[in-house]
Amino acid sequence: MDVVRRLYARFASLVHELAKFGSIGAVAFVLDTGLLNLCNVAFGLGPLTSKVVATTISTTFAYLGNRYWTFRDREQSGLGREYFLFFLLNGIALLFGMLTIGFTTYTLDLHDTLSLNIANIVGVGFGTLFRYWSYKKWVFLEATEPIPVELPDGGVDAGIRRDR
């Protein structure tokens, strides 16, 4: 049991970070897939245009979730810089989805919704691996100073009496 405890202590922050990243990613995936199908089936935008629209909206959600929850303890290097890099890297990751959807639709000539969704899942899987690596490397940088765990004296509840 001591080995397990030491392993957990060593990798706890990574495990928590991956769990948060996965949670945000799961919600963004549902949003992306729902919008992809809505745009393609209900609005008839076509598979590639639908993917671009869906990814743009789900990427905005993912940025906010990752910035203010997953990687909140990392250096904040400016909203404009982060948002630009986040979208640039998501644009690169979008290429994985575009390639798999394009290959499925136009090379394999599979135009049904199931094939579209399978291609989307494969593209999102490859894109997710790229995004996690690139966010940590270029967007949400390691903090240069430790983030305080507790509020300093005189924080939010400074005016509340504690001797009741």
Image: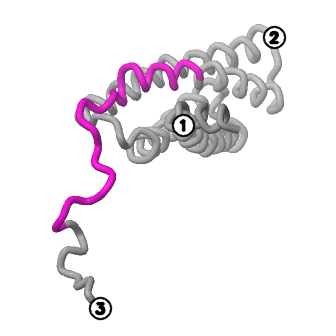
- Relative image position of residue 129 (x, y in whole percent): 59, 21
| Residue on which the image places disc 2 | 108
Q: Quadrant of residue 138?
A: top left
How far apart are labels 3 and 2 at the CA level?
A: 73 Å
Mark sitting on residue 50: none
Instruction: Say which element carries label 1.
Output: helix
Question: Which circle's residue, 3 or 2, is located before the other in the chain?
Answer: 2
Would residue 98 be visible to someone looking at this image? yes
Residue type beneath disc 1: Ala
Q: Is residue 28 above or below residue 136?
A: below
Q: Secondary structure at mark 2?
A: loop
Q: Mark 3 against mark 2, which lies toward the viewer?
A: 3
Name the quarter where the N terminus is drawn.
top right
Earlier sequence position, callout 1 versus callout 2:
1
Magenta-colored span: 129-154
Residue at (36% x, 41% y) in the render: 73
Report helix, strand or loop for mark 3.
loop
C-alpha span from label 1 to label 3: 38 Å
The residue shown at (29%, 32%) is 143
Q: Which residue is label 1 attached to?
A: 9
Q: Quadrant of residue 114?
A: top right
How was this image coloured?
one colour
Q: Amino acid at mark 2?
A: Leu
Circle 2 residues within 10 Å: few <14, some 14–19, many ≥20: few
Q: Name the one closer to the observer, 125 or 17.
A: 17
* Magenta stretch: includes residue 77: no
Residue 149 falls inside the magenta stretch: yes
Say which residue label 3 marks. 164
Name the N-terminal-most of marks 1 and 3.
1
